[in-house]
Amino acid sequence: MSITSNMSMYSLTLQPAGAITHAIVGNFVASRPKEQQVVLAQGERLSLLTIDKDTDQVRTILT
């Protein structure tokens, strides 16, 4: 007689990927035609960033 298990294991990381694998510079927001944005690929995540001209800091538009 054999015993079979119905248990399944699922592994999930709590932190997103940190290494940037690809980066593209361009104009991706139609409402801001004179600003350049950066698209970053980190694992399965894409992020759209821009430079805030008032503070000279990089700001994330969306992820």
Image (spheres, rainbow, N blue to C red):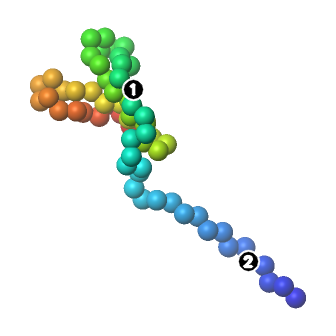
**Horizontal and vertical percent position of residue 10:** 58, 64
Give me the residue at 29% from left, 19% from top.
36
Question: Which quarter of the picture shows residue 58?
Answer: top left
**Horizontal and vertical percent position of residue 22:** 42, 34
Give me the residue at 27% from left, 11% from top.
34
Residue bearing the label numbered 2: 5
Callout 1 secondary element: strand
Q: Considering only order in the chain, which callout, 2 or 1, is on the residue closer to the N terminus?
A: 2
Q: Is residue 29 visible?
A: no
Q: How many marks?
A: 2
Question: Mark 1 against mark 2, which lies toward the viewer?
Answer: 1
Q: Amino acid at mark 2?
A: Ser
Q: Residue furthest right?
A: 1
Question: Which quarter of the picture shows residue 48?
Answer: top left
Callout 2 secondary element: loop
Vertical side of 43 occupied by 25: above or below:
above
Vertical side of 23 occupied by 28: above or below:
above
Residue bearing the label numbered 1: 24
Which mark is drawn over residue 12? none
Q: Is residue 25 visible?
A: yes
Q: Is 22 in front, or is 36?
A: 22
Q: Amino acid at mark 1?
A: Ile
**Horizontal and vertical percent position of residue 32:** 29, 15
Give me the residue at 31% from left, 30% from top.
49
